[in-house]
């Protein structure tokens, strides 16, 4: 009986350590956005706008990833990340309880507001390239169970230009209709380029799949024990 318990225990422990789905999965989310959808205000009313070209605020992609030490939030634009007082790059994150984290970068300054608390001790990289990266620790955001991209907003305030992306983005009137006279139908909110953002990690890492493998391993261990006992 003692040999049986040790064998089953070791088998279960080995399986748990070898299946990533049984461990706490790292934060992972992606939002994509079509190009050519930068808007410029043309009047005082919310529906006074048109599409314009500004690749330096034209959002392509935003992503959350995680290493052993840092959570990394990245924003990719069609042009380059510009250090200028008129240019603002802002990403809103939310946790599994819909609490918000606001990260904004402009002209060398990073502002990071986590659940109403102000933080500036995050690392910034990528100015002058097409991708801005911000790195911080789980402790700085109070270690939520999960983390998602809520919306992305980029601005050229000097020209009253803006681009939006993300599932919670708020578009001006007419955006989802033929609200522009340049002949281009504005893209809808979401991932129109065919890349759907992953939901909580890989489907193969789901708990049901992991427990199925564990069950198979435990049954195998019991059969091995009975065979040796004979």
Image (cartoon, rainbow, N blue to C red):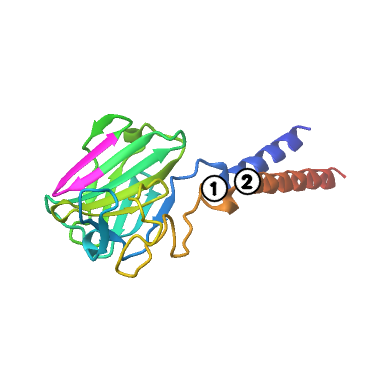
CA–CA distance in space, label 2 to label 1: 10 Å
* Name of the residue lying farthest toward the right: 230
At a point 14% along the width and 54% down the height, the residue shown is 83
Range drawn in magenta:
104-113
| Magenta-drawn stretch contains 55 | no
**Looking at the image, which is closer to me, 92 or 198?**
92
**Image side of residue 22 versus residue 77, left or right:** right
Query: Residue 128 lies in what quarter of the image?
Result: bottom left
Residue drawn where x is 36% and y is 42% of the image = 93
Rendered position, 184 above or below 32 = below
Q: Residues within 10 Å of mark 2 (few under 14, many from 20)?
A: some
Image x and y of residue 176, in percent: 40, 56
Q: Residue at x 67, y 44 (%)?
A: 211
* Disc number placed over residue 213 in the picture, else none: none
Query: In the image, residue 129 lies at what x, y percent?
Result: 22, 62
| Mark 1 Cα-neighbour bin, 10 Å: few <14, some 14–19, many ≥20 | some
Which one is in front, 95 or 18?
95
**Seen from this angle, which residue lies furthest bottom?**
183
The image position of residue 190, as x and y in percent, is: 43, 55
The quarter of the picture where the C terminus appears is: top right
Q: Which mark is residue 15?
A: 2
User: What is the chief secondary structure element of the magenta stretch?
Assistant: strand
Q: Secondary structure at mark 1?
A: helix
- Residue on which disc 1 sits: 20
- Say which of 47 and 51 sits in front: 47
Quarter where residue 111 is shown: top left
Q: Are marks 2 and 1 in contact (CB under 8 Å)?
A: no
Is 48 or 65 nearer to us in this picture?
A: 48
């Amino acid at each position: 009986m003692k040999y049986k318990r040790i064998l089953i225990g070791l088998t279960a422990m080995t399986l748990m350590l070898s299946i990533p789905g049984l461990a706490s999965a790292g934060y992972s989310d992606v939002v994509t956005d079509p190009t050519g959808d930068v808007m410029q205000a043309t009047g005082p009313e919310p529906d006074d706008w048109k599409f314009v070209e500004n690749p330096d605020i034209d959002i392509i992609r935003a992503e959350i990833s995680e290493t052993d030490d840092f959570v990394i939030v990245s924003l990719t634009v069609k042009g380059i990340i510009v250090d200028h007082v008129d240019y603002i790059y802002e990403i809103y994150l939310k946790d599994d309880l819909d609490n918000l984290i606001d990260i904004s970068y402009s002209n060398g300054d990073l502002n990071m507001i986590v659940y109403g608390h102000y933080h500036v001790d995050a690392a910034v990289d990528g100015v002058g390239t097409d991708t801005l990266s911000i790195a911080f620790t789980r402790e700085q955001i109070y270690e939520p169970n999960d983390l998602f991209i809520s919306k992305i907003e980029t601005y050229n305030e000097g020209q009253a230009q803006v681009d939006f992306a993300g599932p919670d983005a708020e578009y001006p009137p007419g955006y989802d209709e033929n609200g522009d006279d340049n002949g281009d139908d504005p893209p809808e909110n979401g991932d129109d380029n065919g890349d759907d953002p992953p939901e909580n990690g890989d489907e193969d890492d789901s708990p049901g799949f992991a427990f199925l493998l564990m069950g198979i391993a435990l049954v195998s261990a019991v059969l091995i024990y009975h065979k040796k006992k004979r």
